[in-house]
């Protein structure tokens, strides 16, 4: 699997300068929304982006390496804020999506990390969900049930963040690790988008626009059409399939002859072609591995299948490894992801994925947890 993307940023319809900054390259995608007096916000967001770019040059291998890069960027901004007077108190949000390469023990994954109220959404199977959690005053009111989602969108203090890079010497970044699935679309954006465009309209534009750059452009245009009261930055990242389908070798039969011997040769050639085709089809149908549930309901077991998720003719997938975990033990959101049958090129990577889920389940059992 690989990623393709589109990105754009706009000052908006009312602001004089753009304090947003972004980074979009194959190994890291970041949006930073700066804050502070004079040019301080612009400086803070630029420092955050530079820090993530420098860290990417050394490579990201784990979620911890991503969080470490965010902590280093925070320290750089905090040090700089002690310099010129007009930079004191500057800060920035930072939201990142980082693809991690597969290893011998782990499949390809996506790391999502967040500080502040810039967001990451995931578009999967026709549905949009917010992955990141806002660090904001209004989000705390919403979480506690004091206001509704509709009230949060228009609350006069909706832009007050409770965490940001550069304000303190240490920062607590939230992070998530998601399975990387073909067809996934990630949206990384500053609050200039979500303050002007509701989730339903965002989902509609993502659904209607296949090209990621065109999708990013349309989202920014929608924010500006709705008022554009803030800078707006959008990155759209698509996960696409890098595999090339197997090609069945063609066999050209000899030129038609009228003799009996030639007819026999033609028949033999046809049989050879049929045998080759069936063999190639069988190889394709039984090639690869995927993760899924064997059975139905809460008692369905988590397994690694050998074959293809979709049955091809009479070739059905078979169970390669049973994780000894049932659906009821798995978090509902993760179970929904597993229903999409993520595929793997090797049994070791597929097995490592289900064993990581089993380890989490066992830790919950040892801790006495009963909710799944």
Image (spheres, rainbow, N blue to C red):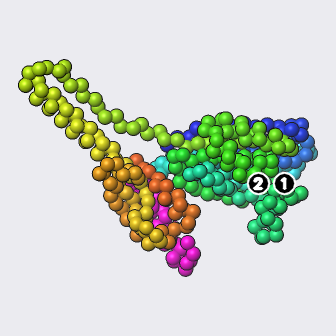
Q: Secondary structure at mark 2?
A: loop
Asked which quadrant contains residue 115, the reply is bottom right
Residue reaching furthest front?
Answer: 258
Q: Label 2 belongs to which residue?
A: 117
Tell whether position 126 is magenta: no
* Residue 4 in view in this figure: yes
Closest to the observer: 322 or 48? 322
Give the spatial CA distance, label 2 vs label 1: 8 Å
Q: Label 1 belongs to which residue?
A: 159
Tell whether position 355 is magenta: yes
Please indicate whether residue 370 sits to the left or right of residue 121 in the image: left
Q: Are marks 2 and 1 in contact (CB under 8 Å)?
A: yes
Q: Quadrant where the C terminus lies?
A: bottom right
- What residue do we see at 55% from left, 78% from top? 370
Q: Secondary structure at mark 1?
A: loop
Label 1: how many residues lie within 10 Å, few (<14), some (14-19) or many (20+)?
some
* Residue 160 in view in this figure: no
Residue 166 in percent (x, y) is at 79, 51
Please indicate whether residue 139 sits to the left or right of residue 277 in the image: right
């Amino acid at each position: 699997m690989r990623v393709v993307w589109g990105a754009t940023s706009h000052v908006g319809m009312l602001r004089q300068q753009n304090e947003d900054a972004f980074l979009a390259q194959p190994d890291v995608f970041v949006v930073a929304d700066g804050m502070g007096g004079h040019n301080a916000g612009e400086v803070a967001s630029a420092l955050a982006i530079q820090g993530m770019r420098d860290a990417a040059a050394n490579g990201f291998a784990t979620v911890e390496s991503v969080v470490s890069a965010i902590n280093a960027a925070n320290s750089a901004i905090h040090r700089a804020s002690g310099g010129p007077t007009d930079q004191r108190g500057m800060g920035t949000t930072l939201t990142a999506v980082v693809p991690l390469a597969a290893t011998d023990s782990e499949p390809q994954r996506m790391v999502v990390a967040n500080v502040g109220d810039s967001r990451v959404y995931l578009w999967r199977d026709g549905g949009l969900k917010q992955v990141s959690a806002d660090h904001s005053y209004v989000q705390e009111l919403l979480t506690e049930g004091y206001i509704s989602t509709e009230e949060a969108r228009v609350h006069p203090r909706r832009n007050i963040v409770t965490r940001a890079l550069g304000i303190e010497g240490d920062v607590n970044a939230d992070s998530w690790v998601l399975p990387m699935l073909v067809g996934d679309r990630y949206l990384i954006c500053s609050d200039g988008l979500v303050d002007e465009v509701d989730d339903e309209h965002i989902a509609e534009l993502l659904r209607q626009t296949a090209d990621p750059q065109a999708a990013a452009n349309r989202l920014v245009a929608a924010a500006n059409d709705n008022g554009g009261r803030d800078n707006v930055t959008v990155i759209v990242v698509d996960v696409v399939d890098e595999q090339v389908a197997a090609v069945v070798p063609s066999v050209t039969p000899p030129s038609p002859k009228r003799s009996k011997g030639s007819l026999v040769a033609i028949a033999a050639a046809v049989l050879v072609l049929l045998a080759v085709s069936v063999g190639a089809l069988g190889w394709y149908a039984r090639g690869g591995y995927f993760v899924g549930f064997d059975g139905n309901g809460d008692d369905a077991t988590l397994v690694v299948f050998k074959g293809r998720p979709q049955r091809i003719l009479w070739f059905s997938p078979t169970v390669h490894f049973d994780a000894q975990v049932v659906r009821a033990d798995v978090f509902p959101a993760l179970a929904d992801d597993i229903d999409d049958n993520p595929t793997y090129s090797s049994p070791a990577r597929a097995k490592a994925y289900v064993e990581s889920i089993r380890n989490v389940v066992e830790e919950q059992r040892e801790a006495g947890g009963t909710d799944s």
